[in-house]
Amino acid sequence: MSFSEETSSQTITISRLAFILPNGSISYNQTSVYFQSLIPTPMRVPNNCSFDTLKRRMDNTLQLTNDQLLDEIYYRQPFIDAGQQYFFQSLQLKNDDDVYTMLMCNDQYSCVGPIELLCTIIRTPDAMLNLLQSTITPTHDAIMYYNGKWNIPRQGEFFGYSFTGTNPIRFGILSECGMEKLKDLIKQVAPTGVPLMEFTDHNWLDDCSFDNQVILSIPKI
């Protein structure tokens, strides 16, 4: 029976009981599907509920943060087979028509219990970007010049200093890298036989970095 066919003599349900299963799982057997979740959360679904209204109510009920986003929603839809036995299938809710189907099924098969909604909760794009940035160790771009040398235009002026050399090699250096780790790193990227004799143990990242780039000149013996 559709909602428009209800008469004043019938009891009109203002809302229906539903249980939300956040980030739950769907299991299948030969005849039905089952929703599982650690903590089902009760919610009321109003008559003539739209898809947007349903999502907003679920968002408020679950108290999602600004970093969380309601993604997919599935309804455990009841039906009766030819033998008049009740079974369930999974219906993904994507629009108003799907929600209308859910409400109609709840009217038609009210004896099976409340509405069951399984949903997936994901991070918002901004939250995923912030998480990614927080897990990435800052690095400095480095250029290594094999058999390189200083180019000093005028004595006593740092501005304008540059390195030149053959076959520059680009690689990354972690911000917390120390002298020993730096030497090991250079051994990995440098040509075989390149010595590390002109390095001294000092805060080389502060002294040698410029515009987040570190330039290293490796002498050849």
Image (spheres, rainbow, N blue to C red):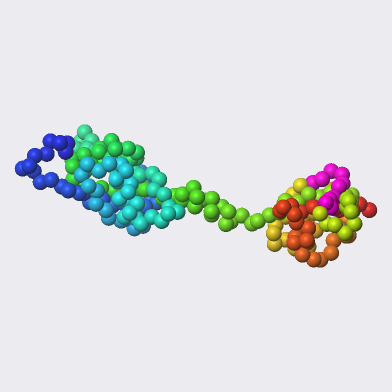
Identify the residue at the far left of this view: 9
Image coords of residue 175 (percent x, y): 69, 59
Q: Point out residue 145 in the picture as x, y percentages from the top left corner.
A: 84, 49
For the record, the magenta segment spans 160-169
State the image quarter where residue 157 is shown: bottom right
Give the prevailing secondary structure in the magenta stretch: strand
Residue at position x 88%, y 51% in the image: 153
Taking the spot 86% from the left edge, 47% from the top edge, the residue there is 164
Residue 19 is one of the magenta-drawn residues: no
Towards the viewer: 86 or 208: 208
Q: Is residue 48 above or below residue 174?
A: above
Is residue 209 rendered to the left or right of residue 18? Answer: right
Q: Is residue 4 visible?
A: yes
Q: On the image, which quarter does residue 49 sit in? A: top left
Tell me the quadrant of the picture where the N terminus can be found.
Answer: top left
Counting labels gives 0
Residue closest to the eye, 39 or 124: 124
Residue at the image position 21 percent from the left and 49 percent from the top: 16
Which residue appears at 28% of the width and 48% of the height? 116
Residue 68, position in %: x, y?
43, 52
- How far from the left and from the top, in percent, is residue 149? 89, 51
Q: Is residue 129 above or below residue 108?
A: below
Residue 162 in magenta stretch = yes
- Could you say which quadrant of the image residue 167 lies in? top right
